[in-house]
Amino acid sequence: MRTRKNGSVFLPSTYSIVFLRVVLRLFLCAALLPAPASAQETGAETEEDIDAELEAWPEFGEDKGVTINSTPETTQQMRVISREDIEKRNPRDLSTLLEEELDMSVTRFGGYGNQTDLSMRGFDTERIAILIDGVPANSPRSGEFDVSQIDMNSVERVEVIYGGSDTRYNVSGALGGVINIITVKKQGKGLHLGGTLSNTGYMPGKYNKRSARNAQRVRGAIGDPEFIDLLDMQSLGLNAGYGAERFSWRASLFGNRAGNHYLYKDDYGFARRKESNEVLDGGGNVSLVWDIGELSMLLSDTKFYYANRDFPITMNSVGSATATDFQLTENLQFNAPLFFADTLGAEAALSYQFTRATYGVDISSVDHHLYAVNRWNWFAADALTVRAGGDWRFLLVNTGSPTETQPVKTGNQGGFYVTGEYKALKNLMIIASVKGAADTRQFVPVPKLGFRWEALDWLVLKNNWFRSFKFPDFDDLYYRSYDSTFVGNPNLRPEDGWGFDLTAELPLSNMSAVEKLPLFQAPGLNSFSVNTTVWGQYTEDSIHWVKSQGGRWSPENVGVAWFVGFDTRPTLTLRIGRRFLETLKIAPSYQFQMSWLLNGDLGFANSFRIPYMPTHIIGCTLDFGWKTGSLLISAHYETTRYADTLNQMPLDPYCILHATLNQNIGKRFTAFASLRNILNAQYESFASYYMPGVSLTLGVKATFGGLISAETGP
């Protein structure tokens, strides 16, 4: 996107429009090509043989979600959260799942429905590529992601890939990594129904009242306990699905009502009750999957989300402004693992998103976002696979804020990539990739080189060297708040840097492997694994919002950011077999993260760290399993963080403890209870935004499967 010197925006040039039309036509041609010829006609393996081989791939199992075509072997550090893991946790939203399951650092601006930032290797949500069913889902304007829009009851699994310059999904701007949320899968045969109902309550108690006349530091009158807080949040989810031989559908609805009326201690040590932060939201989706032959699939997925939120001006404000959000997304995908011949595979996706947002009575925005991606896989030889493709994004923003001098703005970004995967030896894979990232002003090559070496039966080594590159977000360039306190900077330079990581995996997943190592022999040992990674990365022209002497906030290229870290995650599973307890899974984790923000005369000796990046994160989960249920106990600890680039606003360390109990009641019902923040820790997640204390969630799930035979139909 080109800009005038005064910051206003040109509409796309004739050249760019022609280019975009050509890209779109090529994409549509790829998506509408006829299905490939039968494998038997080409003399290749039968469909049954190929289906059996692909069953081991994460993308093609019948019970797996639909996702971008990719290699089952990767050089990157990767974690997968299964549907079983999600059901054991019963998380309220995606951020809760990632914090408790992977000990990811999460920054929240309050309770449910408030802004939430994720952090991977020190990079925030804007620098993490978040995908839904393989299609980028970060806001094309701000780069943020609303975790509330994800119905956790509809998530099949979550793939988390750490590190920059991803070669698995080849999306741009992934400085910290990729999170792929898979919500769609081919349904099993017959009719399936399900539902979840839960209530979350906070511990009531006496607190100091506030009023519009009170200053924040005034203690205020004592308020009696509000027992309605025991019914602070209700959640309801319903789903239905039907699967036949070559066609399936799934529909779901969800809704939440949250008061967010929890108790906390403010900056002056006074007990307060959170007010003016109510949330009412809900959404749903309808997905259709057609099997069009030769393993090829055509997918249509429609999602909608609506939220009505009250946002207090500050954490302690009595008054608030109402914000509403409506989002409609339509995603079309074509997936052909075998295309024309058994050596060629392809996938295409076209996604359109409409977003309407309002804040208060004067600020509104309507966004139209079109995203297209096309990927090809050529299995050139037994030892060589070539992958290539491209993506393109178009954004149209119409802002209703009265301060906007240019209310209608447009933006284009895209790129293409070529990746070669070469199996140099039976146990050594080399992956070399280069992606060209482009907007209407520049084109930048982003290379990556990775290695995967199966050194021993029980040891896998992975190594990556990569360039990391990200264009400034749209709001960073052009945002303007109602009172012009927050304004964008059209002169921002892209964030550009390099990085590396080295991962060692010990996948001792069965007794035969364990028996080879006497050191790990133990009575009842079922499996043992360790995943350890060392990484380093630096970014030039790091972008952060800073406050000028005149009190105005704007994003600036503040300097060079350096990151180094160490991450280790051992997992031990024991067969107990005593009384009702069958298994015990022990999963501790430790993350060390050090960062430096170098600006002007600042050097490494100044040790100024990236805001909201803890140096140490320690976690542990104990998973007790029995035939009809489970009990998860998990702890998460973070050391001191800083709320500003000069490290003058420290946030105290905190430790939170959770427990979740699941118990099956017959074959169709499951009751669950979750105690979160059992220690009632008082802590700030974002500066001056205090998190809830202890809460209790009680709920029940119902599942009815195979009610109607797929052969007879409904």
Image (cartoon, grey):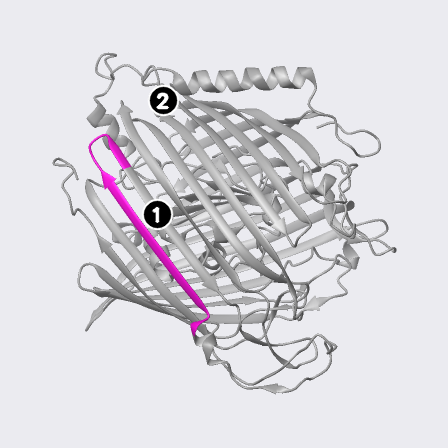
Report if residue 108 is visible in the image.
no
Identified at 39% across, 43% down, the residue is 285
Point out the image quarter for the N terminus.
top right
The reply, left or right, for residue 406 in relation to residue 697 is right
The span picked out in magenta is: 231-248
The reply, left or right, for residue 618 in relation to residue 68 is right
Find disc 2 in the rendering and name its residue.
Answer: 382
Residue 441: x and y, percent? 72, 25
Residue 162: x and y, percent? 52, 45
Find disc 1 in the rendering and name its residue.
Answer: 252
- Counting residues from the start of the chain, the first of labels 2 and 1 encountered is 1
> Alpha-carbon distance for marks 2 and 1?
42 Å
Residue 532: x and y, percent? 49, 52
Asked if the residues shown at circle 2 and circle 1 are in contact, with their CB atoms under 8 angstroms apart, the answer is no
278, 349: nearer the viewer? 278
Identified at 63% across, 42% down, the residue is 365
Identified at 48% across, 34% down, the residue is 169
Residue 107: x and y, percent? 59, 59
Identified at 25% across, 17% down, the residue is 39
342, 33: nearer the viewer? 33
Amino acid at the residue labelled 2: Asp
Point out the image quarter for the C terminus.
top left
713, 581: nearer the viewer? 713
Magenta stretch holds residue 121? no
Question: The residue tagged with tag 1: helix, strand or loop?
Answer: strand
* Whether residue 295 is situated above or below residue 575 in the rendered picture: above
Q: Quadrant of residue 32?
A: top left
